[in-house]
Amino acid sequence: MNILFKILAYSFVIVSLGSCRGDEPKRMPDTIPDIKGSIISLTETGTTQKNSRLQLIVEAEKGNTATYPQASVKVDENTLIEDSNGKRLKAGQLKQGQQVEIWFDGAVLESMPVQATAIAIRASTQPGKL
């Protein structure tokens, strides 16, 4: 009985320590973006302590093989935003006319334009380039 108790106690400690890893850091997806183009409209929908919440209208580049020609994209505190060099950006640093690649998270409402939430955005720091 004493051995069984020790085994259970050690198992509990191991499981408890293993679950304390914390969250993995956010990473840019290694798939083709859902849309690649330029921000044609940008509206701030609110702010949190760390970041702004935005609603973007993005139009795909002409001749691009992106899934959608235009998208209404929600940007929130869970959206990873980086420049083309991998430097983290805040939502407030996105600008109208900026070139972006966007990956969607979860469901996409099939309206025109489609509506989705961004899980990740790669933004150009130089006009017209990405």
Image (tube, rainbow, N blue to C red):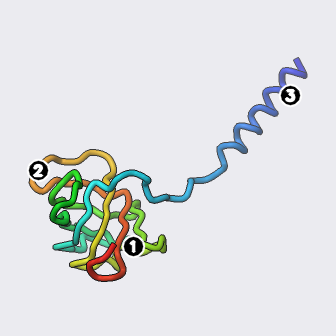
Q: Quadrant of the C terminus?
A: bottom left
- The three-letter amino acid code for the residue at tag 1 is Asn
Q: Quadrant of the N terminus?
A: top right
Q: Residue at x 39, y 64 (%)?
A: 77
- The three-letter amino acid code for the residue at tag 2 is Ser
Residue 18 figure quarter = top right
Indicate the secondary structure of the residue bearing disc 3. helix
Q: Does residue 7 appear anywhere in the picture?
A: yes
Please state the horizontal and vertical placement of residue 50, each as a whole percent of the image: 44, 73
Give the class, few, some or many, for how many residues have Cα within 10 Å of label 1's Cα (few <14, many ≥20).
some
Say whether disc 2 or disc 1 marks the residue closer to the N-terminus.
Answer: 1
Tag 2 and tag 3, C-beta contact below 8 Å: no
Please state the horizontal and vertical placement of residue 106, each as a whole percent of the image: 31, 46
Give the class, few, some or many, for how many residues have Cα within 10 Å of label 3's Cα (few <14, many ≥20).
few
Give the class, few, some or many, for how many residues have Cα within 10 Å of label 2's Cα (few <14, many ≥20).
few
Most extreme residue toward the bottom is: 126
Residue position for label 3: 6
Residue position for label 1: 51
**Cα gap from disc 2 to disc 3, whole angstroms:** 59 Å
Q: Foreground residue, 117 or 31?
A: 31
Q: Residue at x 72, y 44 (%)?
A: 17
Side (left or right) of 5 relative to 85: right
- The three-letter amino acid code for the residue at tag 3 is Lys
